Amino acid sequence: MLIVGGIVALGFILAAVNQNARDKAKAAYQTSLDRLKLDPGNADLRHQTLQLGRIYSNLTRNNKGVTLFDEVALLNDINAACGFLGGPVAPPVAPSVTGVQPSIEERLTRLDALKNRGLISEAEFESKRSKLLDEV
C-alpha cells in the first residue's frame, strides 16, 4: 500500500512539474508575441518567437513533437502580432529626410492603426488625437 501511495504522489509531482514548464513556456511565448507587436519588422524576434512557440506547443503535446497544425497556428499568431491580419494597417511613417513632418491626416491614420492593433489604449489614442487636431 505504501508503494502505491508513493507512485501516486510521484505522479502528482510530475504533473505539477510539467504544468509549471507549460506555464513558463506559454508566458515566454506570449511575452515574445507582445514584443513582436512593438517591433514587427524584426526578423530575429520573429524567429525567436517561432522557436518559443514550438517549445510551448511541444510541451502541450507531452513532448511528442510539433504538428503541422501547431506550425500553422504559430505562424498565424506571429502574423497577427505583426499586423498582417485584422484589416488594413497604415504603413509606418518614415522619418523625413527633408525634415518635413507627415500631414495631420497621415499622422491620424497611423494613430488609428496603432489603436486598432492594440498597441495604444483608448485614452492614449484620444489624448494624441486631441493634440494632433489642435495643430490644425
Image (spheres, rainbow, N blue to C red):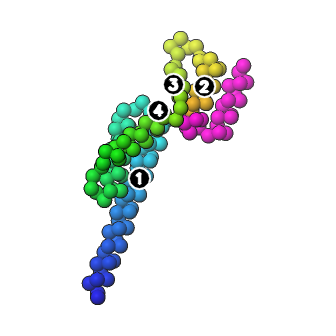
Whichever of labels 4 and 1 marks the residue nearer the N terminus, that label is 1
Location of mark 3 (residue)? 92
Q: Which residue is drawn at 35% across and 46% down?
A: 69
88 or 133, which is in the foreground? Answer: 88
Whichever of labels 3 and 2 marks the residue nearer the N terminus, that label is 3
110 or 136, which is in the foreground? Answer: 110
Q: In this view, does 106 lie above or below 85?
A: above
Q: How many labels does the image show?
A: 4
The kind of secondary structure element at disc 4 is loop
In the orientation shown, which residue stands out farthest toward the front? 69
Whichever of labels 4 and 2 marks the residue nearer the N terminus, that label is 4
From the top left corner, tell me how far across and down residue 28 is, in percent: 40, 50
Mark closer to the observer (4, 3):
4
What are the residue bounds of the magenta stretch?
115-136
Mark closer to the observer (4, 2):
4
Q: Magenta stretch: residue 103 in it?
A: no
The amino acid sitting under disc 2 is: Thr
Whichever of labels 1 and 2 marks the residue nearer the N terminus, that label is 1
Whichever of labels 4 and 3 marks the residue nearer the N terminus, that label is 4
Determine the CA span between mark 1 and mark 2.
Answer: 33 Å
The amino acid sitting under disc 3 is: Pro
